[in-house]
Amino acid sequence: MVARPKGKIERRLGENLFLKGHRCLGPKCPHVRRPSVPGVHGKKKSRRASSEFGTQLFEKQRMKWRYGLSEKEIARYIRGAGKKSGKTTAEYFMERVEQRLDNVVFRGGFAVSRSIARHLIVYGHILVNGRRVTKPSYEVRKGDVIQIRPASLKSKMFEELEVYLKKYESPLWLVLDKGEKRLNVQDRPATALDARELINLKPVVEFYSR
């Protein structure tokens, strides 16, 4: 399978997904430099397809790339929403993906993107309750403590973390200790997303309910 240029993915979806890491914090981000859809006729193209299926596919792709999920993971989360959960499929889905460790590391400010968060987790830089967890899909629970491995803080990948955290504010369900580089999960994640991250979940649910 040929890798797709990350910059073109962001441009096609019309969203800064920080797939280029720290580069996407400034004007060099592909989505900022060239906001149009990629291709020869990109400036004339619409990102959204007019058909119902096209809309479902577009929103599914946004969800997939934003959270770094595989097709199987999305399907499992959506189809796992049973009547016993007491939540709608969309609410159940969002709670599950927000509880993923890669998302929590990102939400807590330890990484500028979920893709970088996954890298940190896989290479053993993240501790959960004092133990290394190398699985990005690991789901945190209320009361868990997430922190960067002390020895890892000396590496170059965290040299800008101190400056980044000074202006960063974590969501209310996470308590961030900026000095100790530690996160406390004090509640279940809220299902309401920041206005900048709104995704129409209805088409995504419909896509996997066909």
Image (cartoon, rainbow, N blue to C red):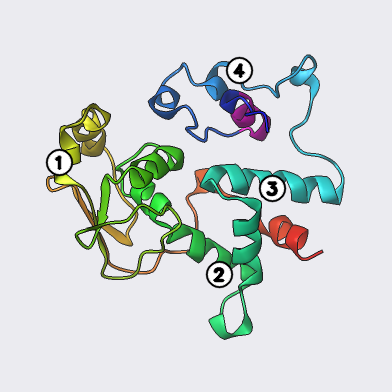
In front: label 1 or label 2: 1
- The residue positioned farthest toward the right in the image shown: 51
114 to the left or right of 146: right
Q: Is residue 149 magenta?
A: no
Q: Main secondary structure of the magenta part?
A: helix
At label 4, which amino acid type do we have? Arg
Instruction: Give the spatial CA distance, label 1 vs label 2.
Output: 36 Å
Circle 3 sits on which residue?
Answer: 59
Instruction: Give the spatial CA distance, label 3 vs label 4.
Output: 21 Å
In front: label 1 or label 4: 1
The image quarter in which residue 184 lies = bottom left
- The residue positioned farthest toward the left in the image shown: 179
In front: label 1 or label 3: 1
Q: Residues within 10 Å of mark 4 (few under 14, many from 20)?
A: some
Instruction: Give the spatial CA distance, label 2 vs label 3.
Output: 17 Å
- Image point (13%, 48%), residue name: 180
Give the SS element for disc 1. Answer: helix
Q: Are marks 3 and 4 in contact (CB under 8 Å)?
A: no
- Image point (41%, 44%), residue name: 118
Q: First in sequence: mark 1 or mark 2?
A: 2
91 versus 35 height, above or below: below
Circle 1 sits on which residue?
Answer: 151
Q: Are marks 4 and 2 in contact (CB under 8 Å)?
A: no
Give the magenta part as a residue range.
8-14
Q: First in sequence: mark 2 or mark 3?
A: 3
For this rendering, which residue is in front, 14 or 207? 207
- Image point (40%, 26%), residue name: 25
30 to the left or right of 55: left
Q: First in sequence: mark 1 or mark 3?
A: 3
The image quarter in which residue 171 lies = bottom left
